[in-house]
Every structure is written in structure tokens, then in C-alpha cells.
Amino acid sequence: MLKPADLAAIRAIITRAKRWDLFFSLLGILSLMVGVLTFTVLFVDMAIQGVPRLSMDFFTSFPSRRAEHAGILSAWVGTVLVMLVTALSAVPLGVAAGVYLEEYAPKNWITDIIEINISNLAGIPSIVYGLLALGLFVYYFGFGQSVLSAGLTLALLILPVIIVATREAIRAIPQSIHEGSYACGATTWQTVSDHILPYSSAGILTGVIIGMARAIGETAPIITIGALTFIAFLPTAPFSGDPPAGLFDWIFAPFTVMPIQMFNWTSRPEAAFSINAAAAGFVLVFMTLAMNGLAIYVRYRLRKNIKW
Amino acid sequence: MTASATLSSQPRPLGSGISDRLSKKASRHVKERIIEGLLFSAAAFSVFVTIAIVYVLVKESWVFFETVPLSDFLFDTQWTPLFDDAHYGIMVLLSGTLTSSAVALLVAIPLGTIIAIYLSEFAGFKVREIAKPFLELLGGVPTIVYGYFALTFLTPILQKIYPDLPGFNLLSAGLVMGIMIIPYVASLSEDAMRAVPMALREGSYAMGATRLQTALWVVTPAATSGIASAYILGISRAVGETMILAVAAGMQPNLTFNPTEPGATITSYIVQVALGDLPHGSIGYQTIFAAGLTLLLMTLAFNLLGYWLRKRFREVY
């Protein structure tokens, strides 16, 4: 039999333990709020500073020594062109590597090395990729400080992201789909191209979007390859100019991108440039948020539609 | 062969159908092999990238170390590669990297772990469904934007508390870097905790333990290997982070472990040199590769440590 005194002691222990539980819940919410609050403050502060500066002129003007006339035309065009090169090189390579590792790779030491290597690549700081590109693309291959060098650098950087996303998307497809296809006499490639790729395309797309969102904001590797910070012209469009530019001349053009333009304005002492930096930063964050939001939406739709 | 022989013995108007089918089969086989080869080369390309990174860094650093002895590089207390009286003491840059990373980790590891425990053990389904994508967004903000935030928002606030704080300092950069790293630590730790089987929790609850007791004494120990790799990832992010430091910490090489001073890190030095126009092949140009090699070796060491921790503390259910 429990004596009343013991019962009271046990109740006290329970109350105390429950109090700690409650305390930790509050601590958890508080910690989450630190993240949420920082992000909100960052976004609102930048919006207050930068949004008044956003006008049509801001998007259609070149950078200038006078802050109030400066714009981000060369920066956003540069970002779009670099992203184009990045997507065209990283997506086929990454998806092919992911498909190989999931559908073809035998279990042997070569596969092990490739897998360990990919997880290692994901941990290498982005600036090291910049140094690789400086040594390899800029000087060894002689691409110079061009859209091509920058696009390929970012492609290498997001390759692990795309490979991992592809593998996860493929792994979510049940084994019975493979078996059904093989039972009908399909070859491995027929199975992959007719079944595996179509069914995993939404998952792969999510990974590609997240990778591209990361690439858009990357500054360090592009500065390292020596991108110019002041560009007041656009790459010549194909077949324009005199003599007419070739279809792919723009990939060898010098360029600047959004984060570099923002860095350039941030590092100037005048307050007017700081406002420009806030405006550019707002556009940049808006772009990454939109891409991440799109990825979340695609993933949500995917979860809703496909029930294996 | 036998199959075609038996087939052709049967009365058929045309024998060409079979050889057609056979040749189709053969060409199909060749096509399959070619595709497999292409896909394999895509996967093997990643190994080539690693080899290229090591080759480029070692090749350029080799030239550097032919001029500068390794002992000077490791033990000199000055870093002035662009001056006439050049010194190449990597310690100076390393101190900046270590100081800012320490500040960042003091923010990211406690907060990240608490968030992970909260999301995995306390929060309801709805909170988790909203919080996880939000954390991902926090990790997706470009680091240059964080740098701008540290320089123009956090530093002025900190200056109100410590009036002596210089406009560029490692403290404000480190704090913001910590916020940036929280999502990596929290998300990976949470995944590790969620992978702990429900039966362990149920056993603990059945003994009368509260949620917090279960989380701290059952779930966390069982998830140690995953949490350790989350911390390691956080450390390598902090060591490799560039733009926040380049913007908010100044780029002044400074042998100090005091976060309230300005300082240069390995990464921000590389950016500083790349912004100027050093001629290709000069000693200043090669210093960034020596610095990059140091950085690569550090992250490699952390990766190996993480790999070892995962093996050492892995719990198999």
C-alpha cells in the first residue's frame, strides 16, 4: 500500500517532469521562432530599403557610377544565360548518372567509389569549385571569364544535388513496375525510358528546381573565376551586329550575374548604393523563394496524385 | 542457332522474317550496350571532377611551395602575400576561419538540435509540415543576402550593445552564418531521430517517462550517428562559407581569436584576390590555390571524421 506521503512525493515528481516537458516545448517553439524571425526581419528590412527603388528603369538600365541611374539589366540577363548553360549541362549529366546508379550499376567496388565520391563532392565548399574552374575552364581550356565558364562551374556544383534527387525519385517507384516491364520483354533502356523516367519526372524536376535555386544565389565560385563586376553591355544576340554574331557567340561573352552585382553595390560605402543592393537582393531572394515554392508545390502535387 | 534451325524446318513462306528478327535483336543488344556505356560515363564523370579538383589545386600549390617553404606557410604569423615584404603564414587566415566558425556553431548546434528534437518528438503533424519547408527556404537564401543583412542590420544593432565594435567584425558574420547553418543541422538531425523505431519510444513511455525524458535519454542516444553527421555537415558549411565573411567581416588578415575584431578567412582571401587582377602564374595567383588546398584538406578531414563517426556509433535495428 502506498502511504499518502509517498503518493504526494510521486505526484510532485510527475508535476516537475511535466513542467520540464512544457518548458522544452516552449524552448523548441522559441528556437524555431529565431529562424522565422530572422528570415522575416531580413526580408522586410530589405523590402523597406529596396522596394521603392524597384521600377521598370531598374530592370532596363545598366550599372552606373551614379546610384540613382544604376540598374540590373546586364545582371539579370547574365543570370538567365548562365542558368541556361548550367541547366543544359547539369540536368542530362545528373539524370544519366542517377539512372545508371539506380538501374544499371552492378554491386562492385567501382560503383562504391562513384557513390562515396558523389557524397564527398556534395561536401566540398563552393569556392573550391571556383578554383577548379579558374584552373581548368578559364586557363586550361581557354574559355576565359565567360558565360560558358560560369555555367559549367555552377553545373558541377549542383550535379550532386540532381543525382541524389534523381536516385530518390527512382527509388520511390515500386519494384513491381520494373518487373512488369521486364516480363513483357522490355530491355533495361526501354524500361527506363518508357516507365522509370516518366514516373520519376516530377521528383527529378523538384530536385532540378532546388539545384537551380541554389545556383542562382552562388556568388563565390563565379567571383573566383574572375567575373567582372561592372558590365555595361549585353552579349550580342545571335545573328545581330556587324559582322553578324554566330548562334553561340554569347557563351564566350563577358558577363555579370545578380549576386555579383549585389556584392559590388554592397561593398561601396555610399548609402545610395546600399539601397540598390537591397533592391537587387530583394529581386534575388524573390527569385529563389519563387523557385523553392515551385519545388514545394510540385512535390505536393506529386504526393497527391501518385498512389502506388 | 538450334532455335532458328527448328523454326526454319517448319513450312514458312519467307525465311527472311526470322533473320530480320534476329538482326533486330542483335542491334537492340548493341544499342543497349551503347546506352549503358553512356550512362556509366555520366556517373564516372563525377570521379573525374574530384580528380580534376585535386589535380588543379595540387599542381598550382606545388609551384607555390617551391618558392615558399612549408614551414613558413604553417608557422609564420603574418599573411602579406601582396606586399613587397611578403609573408605567407596560413595561421592568420586559419584563425579567422576558426573564430567565425566557432561563433556560427555556437548558434547553429544548440538551436539546430533543439529544433530537431522539438520537431521530431514534440510538434504535431501540422507544425512539422509547415516548419520543414520553411527551414528549407531559410537554407536556400543566397549567402550574399545574409552578408548584406549582417553588415547593414546586425552590426549596427550589435554596435549599440558594444559601442567599440568595428563596422566589419567576425562576430556579426559568425552569428548570421549560424542562422544560415541551422536548417542543415536541424533537418539532418530530425531525419536521424525520426528513423529511431517507435518501439523504443513506446517502451520508454510505458516505463512512465515523459516526452522530454524519452527524447533526451532514449531517442537522442539512439540517433547519435546521424546527429553527429549533421554536426559535421554544419562544421564543413561554416568552414567553407565565403560571401557572408567577405561582406561583413572585412578582408583584413588578422591573427586573432577575438570575434569582435575584423578578420580575413581562407575563403574571403580567395575572393579578395579574385576581385583584383593578379596576373596568371604570379605567386599571388598561386597563393589562392594553396589556400584552397588547405580548405579542401580541412573539409576532407571533417568528411572522414563524419564517416568514421557514422560507422562507430551506428545503431542497427
Image (spheres, coloured by chain):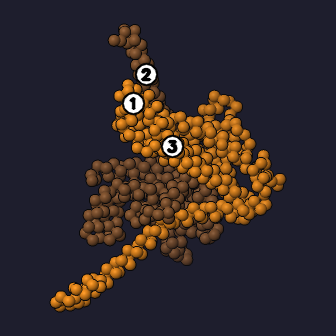
Task: Return the residue at label 1.
Answer: B204
Determine the colour of chain A: brown
Rendered view: A26 above or below A113: above
Label 2 with label 3: CB-CB less than 8 Å: no
- In the picture, the quarter occupied by the C terminus of chain B is top left
Q: How much space separates mark 3 and mark 1, taking CA atoms?
A: 21 Å
Q: Which mark is residue A194?
A: none
**Quarter of the view holding residue B146:** top right
What is the C-alpha distance between the residues marked 2 and 1? 14 Å
Q: Residue furthest top?
A: A4
Report whether residue B159 is seen: yes
Amino acid type for the residue under numbered disc 1: Ser
* The label number, if any, that marks residue A17 in the structure image: 2
Name the residue type under label 3.
Phe
Protein chain holding label 2: A
Instruction: Give the residue at mark 3.
Output: B313
What secondary structure is found at the residue carrying circle 3?
helix
Chain the render paints orange: B
**Between tags 2 and 1, which lies in front?**
1
